[in-house]
Image: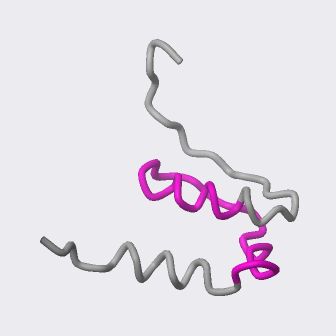
Amino acid sequence: IFPAREPQPAEIETYDDHRIAMSFAITGLRSPGITILDPECVGKTFPDFFRCLRRLTQAEQVS
């Protein structure tokens, strides 16, 4: 989309869809202000998703 705009804070309704929750959790790593409503819905397919995401984002870079 042109011209590019800065991402805006947003509340994301997952509609109990784990794919939406996981996608926007990753998007939120680069776009601050993302709030995921009902993040627990990831539990149906990937119960440890947020724990794993936290570990990945805290990992040191390997040269």
Which residue is at the front of the view, 36 or 47?
A: 47
Assess whether residue 1 is covered by the magenta stretch: no
Left or right: 13 with respect to 32? right
Q: Quadrant of residue 15?
A: bottom right
Position above or below: 5 against 60:
above
Q: Is residue 39 magenta?
A: yes
Q: Which residue of the protein is positioned furthest toward the front in this rendering?
A: 63
Model colouring: one colour
Percent of width and height locating residue 28: 51, 55
Q: Which residues are magenta?
A: 21-46
> Outermost residue toward the top?
2
Quarter occupied by residue 60:
bottom left
> Which residue appears at 21% of the width and 72% of the height?
61
Q: Residue at x 45, y 13 (%)?
A: 3
Give above or below for 15 relative to 6.
Answer: below
Front residue of 2/38: it is 2
Residue 5 in the image, given as x and y percentages of width and height: 46, 24
Does residue 50 lie above or below 7 as drawn? below
Residue found at the very far left of the displayed protein: 63
- Spot occupied by residue 63 in the image (x, y as percentages of width and height): 12, 71
Q: How many marks on residues?
A: 0
On screen, residue 54 above or below 20:
below
**Image location of residue 55, percent across then percent down:** 41, 83
